[in-house]
Amino acid sequence: MGLFRSVVKEAWEKTFLFTKFLCFLHVTDNYLVDPVKIYGPSMLPVIDLNPSIFLAERITPRSGKITHRDIVVFRSPQNPRRTVTKRVIGLEGDSITYVSNPENSDNDKHETVVVPKGHVWVQGDNKYNSTDSRHFGPIPYGLIESKIFWKVFPLDDFGSFWRK
């Protein structure tokens, strides 16, 4: 009976330790830092076409400290199952003037919009190939999940990603 108790006790301790580890991962991923895979042409030249992995922190958006030029990860207003990465161009109350159709140089129609309260204006760095606020308008602040701060992969660019 003593051998059985020691096996059960050891199994319980390992299960408890594993459960604590899973809780730690859950809290870290949902409330602190999130690994994000980014690819596509919309953020060229800052983020290239090859898939890159970044760390994005979740504290800044929750505390309301997003600023101009931050690169944020947010839920797409067109497809809530997708996350999108863009640069913050305007905060609530800012007046934004943009070219509505940058692909057509014959029709350089400039539009101006004031970002409403509780919203931000986001745009990709590649203005010719980006679906952003020029297409779907300002996004509610609540859709922002995190802010990019560290590049993890590829390793040759490993390091801080502030204000790039």
Image: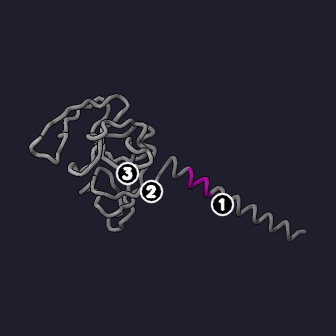
Q: Secondary structure at mark 2?
A: strand
**Earlier-in-chain disc, 3 versus 1:** 1
- Tell whether 70 sits left or right of 82: left
Which dot marks residue 26? none
Q: Is residue 98 above or below residue 46?
A: above
Residue at 29 percent across and 44 percent down: it is 132
Task: Residue type at mark 2: give it.
Answer: Pro
Q: Earlier in the sequence, mark 3 or mark 2?
A: 2
Q: Which mark is residue 18?
A: 1
- Tell me the residue that label 3 is attached to: 148
Assign a secondary structure to mark 1: helix
**Measuring 56% from the left and 49% from the top, which residue is drawn there?**
27
Residue at image position (35%, 50%) is 85
> Which residue is the site of mark 2?
35
Q: CA distance from mark 3 to mark 2?
A: 9 Å
Precedes in sequence: disc 1 or disc 2: 1
